[in-house]
């Protein structure tokens, strides 16, 4: 079986939640019109990764931002990255939305050191049963090679697909022709996908990083979907908006990957 996924590689303008959320709603609607059952959007799509506006503009989950996106998620499953306010703490959060409701949230565990003055890391993992299958949710650097234990845990929990809102950035002097972006993520995604027969879909925004240690960097898209056999199903363009439509094969829920079988055998 397979599921049609829309990869919404959209522009994120730091500190401009109204424009960003409107853009995200348009992407969700366009993907739904193209027959997608799942839509993946970038990390921190409301305010931009590490932008200081989060201190005053971040919203709770559930809250107005999730309500707006969830209302657009009519008949589709949406994975989106938002900045979440929880009391005096901020979290870099991915939410899973459908038909007006928040089905799940994941607070990014492997936040980079440069972002820890803004975001509090998460401390838990979970999978969610949905009409399209069992979904694992994480955020960007949760899939770095040093953090693959997180994705493996989601695979061990039975995830049939892993959705990962991301914000992939390069420094101002990056030479894409000499050093094409993406090998780091491709290696990690392939490791998880092949070990658990669990496709991995990561979607990054485009647009500047403003403020903080990475001021002047830019997010460059290059969104990536890897299938259960490690094949590249889709790649987003470099430094350009795009809506990619990809049919992603899923394993049958009763066809367990080897690590789960081994654990159950004792």
Image (tube, grey):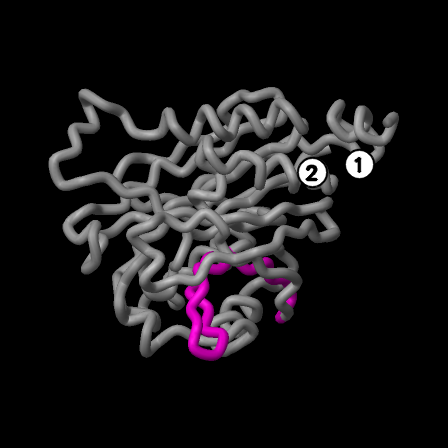
Quarter of the figure that contains the C terminus: top right
Dots 1, 2 in contact, CB < 8 A = yes
Percent position of residue 108, x then y: 49, 53
Secondary structure under badge 2? loop
Residue 95's tag is none
Residue at image mark 2: 160
> What percent of the width, then of the height, locates residue 199?
60, 33
Is residue 176 magenta-colored?
no
Which residue is labeled 1 in the image? 253
The span shown in magenta is 80-100
Whether residue 91 can be seen here: yes
Which of the pair 195/71 is nearer the observer?
A: 195
Residue drawn at point x = 63 percent, y = 60 percent: 104
- Residue neighbourhood size for the residue with mark 2, other residues' Cα within 10 Å, grouped as few (<14), some (14–19), many (≥20): many
The residue that appears at 23% across and 39% down in the rendered structure is 170
Left or right of 204? Residue 50 is left
Main SS of the magenta segment? strand
């Amino acid at each position: 079986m397979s599921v049609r996924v829309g990869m919404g590689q959209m522009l994120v303008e730091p500190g401009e939640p109204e424009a960003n959320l409107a853009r995200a709603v348009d992407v969700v609607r366009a993907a739904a019109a193209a027959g997608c059952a799942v839509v993946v959007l970038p990390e921190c799509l409301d305010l931009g990764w590490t932008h200081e506006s989060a201190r005053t503009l971040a919203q709770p989950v559930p809250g107005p931002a999730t309500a707006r996106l969830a209302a657009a998620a009519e008949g589709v499953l949406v994975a989106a990255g938002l900045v979440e306010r929880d009391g005096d703490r901020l979290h870099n959060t991915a939410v899973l939305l459908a038909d007006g409701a928040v089905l799940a949230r994941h607070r990014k565990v492997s936040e980079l050191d440069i972002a820890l003055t803004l975001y509090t890391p998460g401390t838990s993992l979970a999978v969610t049963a949905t009409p399209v299958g069992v979904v694992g949710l994480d955020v960007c650097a949760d899939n770095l090679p040093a953090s693959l234990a997180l994705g493996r845990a989601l695979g061990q929990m039975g995830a049939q697909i892993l959705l990962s809102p991301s914000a992939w950035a390069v420094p101002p002097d990056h030479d894409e022709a000499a050093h094409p972006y993406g090998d780091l993520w491709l290696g990690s995604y392939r490791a998880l996908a092949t070990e658990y027969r669990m496709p991995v879909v990561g979607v990054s925004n485009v647009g500047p990083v403003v403020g903080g240690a990475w001021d002047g960097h830019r997010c460059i898209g290059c969104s990536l979907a890897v299938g259960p056999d490690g094949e590249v199903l889709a790649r987003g363009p470099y430094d350009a908006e795009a809506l990619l439509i990809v049919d992603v094969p899923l394993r049958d829920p009763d066809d367990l990957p080897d690590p789960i079988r081994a654990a159950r055998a004792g």
